[in-house]
Amino acid sequence: MFFPYDTSTAGLPPPDSTRTLTVQNGDTVRLSMDWVAKRINGHKIRMLGYNKSIPGPTIRIPQNARITLLLTNNTSLPTSLHSHGIRMDSSIYDGAPMDGSALIDSGQTGVYHLNFPDAGMFWYHPHVREDYQQELGMYGNYVVIPADSAYWPTVHRELPLMINDLLLKTTGLQTYYSNDVNYTMMGRFGNVFLINGDTDFVLHVKRNEVIRFYATNSSSARIYNLQFSDPQLRMNLIGSDVGRYLTPKIRTSDLLGPAERLVFQTWFNDTAGKWDTVRIWHVTPYQTFVLGKIVYDADTAATDLRSSITTAESPIVKASIDSFRVFFGTPPEQEITLYGYMDHSQPMAPLKVSASQYDPNLNNQLVYRDWYDNMGAMNSQSDTANMHWIMRDDKTGLVNHAIHWVFRRGSAPLIRIHNDSTSVDPAHPHYMFHPMAHAIHFHGQRFLVVAQNGKVPDDAFVWKDTYLVAPGSTVDLLLDASNPGDWMFHCHLAEHLEAGMMAHFSVAP
């Protein structure tokens, strides 16, 4: 029997506006987990927020600072707080409830002592029922201000873009269950999009303004292909999960997998859009979705900063990568295979991925089933009992929670990840096989993507904490094992994580 979560909104306040908290080394930040009632597409929906806002506060903090973060749980749900991408020096404050010790119960306050060694855009979210708590609004950004003022080019302003989607039915939010997770096959794809908590996001820009955007994908399953509707507008891709690219790129679009971040700069030149409204698009091979609008104001930016649109190599990033080049090309220390199968009463042929289903014009060669929930009935009936997502250690045969690797601190192990799209699980040959892309996230460390299908990928040479591994792909990650403790790695499609796609590793002092 399934027990739906409470959807009542009686007595709940509307969400507050998202605030920016500027903190310094040694400060204490106080957050709370609260119920709110947000109106979306004519429905009043019971949602969650940090400090009663969706997203939670944007926390701006200097690089190398240390703070204490207190999270008070004002709900009846157990929760935790995971500072995603932060290479904190103790796994005690990672918020991953591997043994239950990280849980914050109703009325309790969790204490997190955090350090921020890397510049860039990071985020925080729960690590308990991410499919529910995160999707309902519990997400917020850290903006870590570089110690070196030359780290980022000069721009007129910076703007976080927290992108999410929600699945609504005619009466409101599609049902979630307190005792089980559904949509575990494809993930829960939303039909309503939000930027910074708004379904009608509008950004006003000045002529010739240069803006640096920090985009975060906080959706549980959706992969975004971001671009502007005006073809004259370009995305100067200057950073990703853990800081700057070694060499920035100029593109018209880029992919953003679940939990990944994208830092890009755009010069809104005075001919772009011909002064009409410009859209922020999510473009797939089959449909284009409007995420938000950009409106040109009559004013002109005070200074000409178009030179900040750059493809120049960063000496800071070069120095951080060069010491790891000695490990490039080393044999893999660990290898895992990703796959999934669904219980079925009758023998079925596996859902193999053929070459005709790939789109060569899109990075990572995603296939049709990664863009949509095109198996709606089957997906809605899938749950943790009948859908099985697997991370298999190829050396030991162990899977998911049974995997526990140990690395030496200061080492740089090469980890090879193969997303199997052609075979069935040998132990369950009569079950349906289902390939999908998986956003693999390592806690507490950073990594470099040094090979994809035997070649250096186009988005290499930026430090990452999450990477989208496409069906049929083999990816080599070089892990910077720098922070001792017990950590986890997992698929960041929330429904896949809840269906068991999670393993452990330790970094020994």
Image: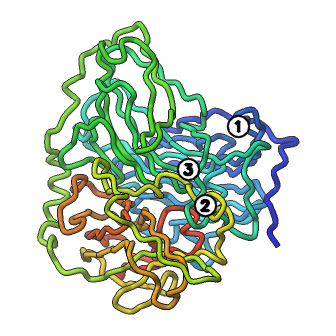
Q: Amino acid at mark 2?
A: Glu
Taking the spot 15% from the left edge, 55% from the top edge, the residue there is 319
**Image quarter in which the C terminus is found:** bottom left
Within the image, what quadrant is residue 421 found in? Answer: bottom left
Name the secondary structure under disc 1: loop
Residue under label 1:
15
Residue 61 visible to the viewer: no
Q: Earlier in the sequence, mark 2 or mark 1?
A: 1
Left or right for 443, reference 189 = left
Name the secondary structure under disc 2: helix
Front residue of 12/87: it is: 12
Q: Crowding at label 1, few (<14), some or many (≥20) Cα neighbours within 10 Å?
A: many
Cα separation between marks 2 and 1: 20 Å
Front residue of 319/49: it is: 49
Residue 395 location (% of width, % of height): 34, 90
- Tag in front: 3 or 1: 1
Q: Earlier in the sequence, mark 3 or mark 1?
A: 1
**Image quarter in which the N terminus is found:** bottom right
Residue 335 location (% of width, % of height): 32, 81
Q: Crowding at label 2, few (<14), some or many (≥20) Cα neighbours within 10 Å?
A: many
Cα separation between marks 3 and 1: 23 Å
Residue under label 3:
28
- Tag in front: 2 or 1: 2
Q: Earlier in the sequence, mark 2 or mark 3?
A: 3
Q: Crowding at label 3, few (<14), some or many (≥20) Cα neighbours within 10 Å?
A: some
Cα separation between marks 2 and 3: 25 Å
Residue under label 2:
130
